[in-house]
């Protein structure tokens, strides 16, 4: 009887962990994407057009940033997180690019 209770408790723990762990990972991912989006939006809205053009060029050449690499990897694997980031940054990015005449092909 004692072994049966231990098995039931162990099974319950396993089920809880397999259910909770993805939820925690998703929440962590959302927090990282929020922080990343905040940095992007703050940088874009507070930068002059010249500063923004220089930062864009620098960001293209600096791909060794560990936080950036981690977020990019998460975004490639998780379409919901990608959608969340795009929804947060699309309007500020597009508006600043239009204001600064940085739209490619324009």
Image (tube, helix red, strand yellow):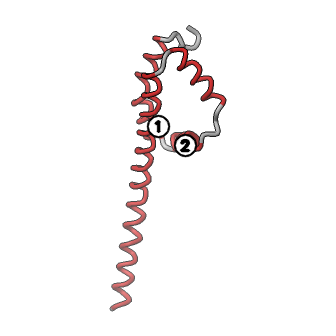
**Disc 1 or 2, which lies upstream in sequence?**
1
Q: Quadrant where the N terminus lies?
A: bottom left
Residue where numbered disc 1 is placed: 36
Q: Height in image: 101 above or below 15?
A: above
Q: Position of residue 84 (x, y in %)?
A: 41, 36
Q: Residues within 10 Å of mark 1 (few under 14, many from 20)?
A: some
Q: Dividing the picture into quarters, in which one does residue 80 lie?
A: top left
Residue 36's place in the image compared with 24, above or below, is above
Give the image location of residue 3, x and y in percent: 38, 89
Q: Residue at x 39, y 61 (%)?
A: 19
* In this picture, residue 1 sits left or right of residue 85: left
Residue drawn at (57%, 14%) of the image = 104
Q: Residue at x 42, y 34 (%)?
A: 38
The furthest residue to the right: 61
- Seen from the viewer's position, the closer of residues 79 and 87 is 87
Residue 67 is labelled as 2
Residue 92 x/y as whole percent: 42, 22
In the image, residue 63 above or below residue 97 = below
Quick one: 50 or 24, which is closer to the camera?
A: 50
User: How far across and how far down the image is residue 64, in percent?
Assistant: 64, 39
Q: Would you identify the image quadrant in which residue 45 lies?
A: top left
Query: Along the line of sight, which residue is nearer the eye, 44 or 75?
Result: 44
Q: Which residue ends up furthest to the bottom in the rendered image? A: 1
């Amino acid at each position: 009887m004692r072994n049966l209770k231990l098995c039931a408790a162990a099974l319950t723990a396993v089920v809880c962990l397999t259910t909770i762990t993805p939820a925690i990972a998703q929440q962590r991912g959302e927090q990282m994407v929020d922080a990343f989006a905040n940095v992007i939006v703050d940088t874009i809205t507070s930068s002059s057009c010249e500063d923004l053009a220089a930062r864009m060029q620098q960001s293209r050449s600096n791909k060794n940033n560990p936080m950036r690499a981690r977020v990019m990897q998460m975004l490639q694997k998780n379409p919901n997180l990608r959608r969340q980031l795009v929804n947060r940054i699309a309007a500020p990015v597009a508006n600043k690019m239009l204001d600064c005449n940085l739209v490619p092909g324009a």
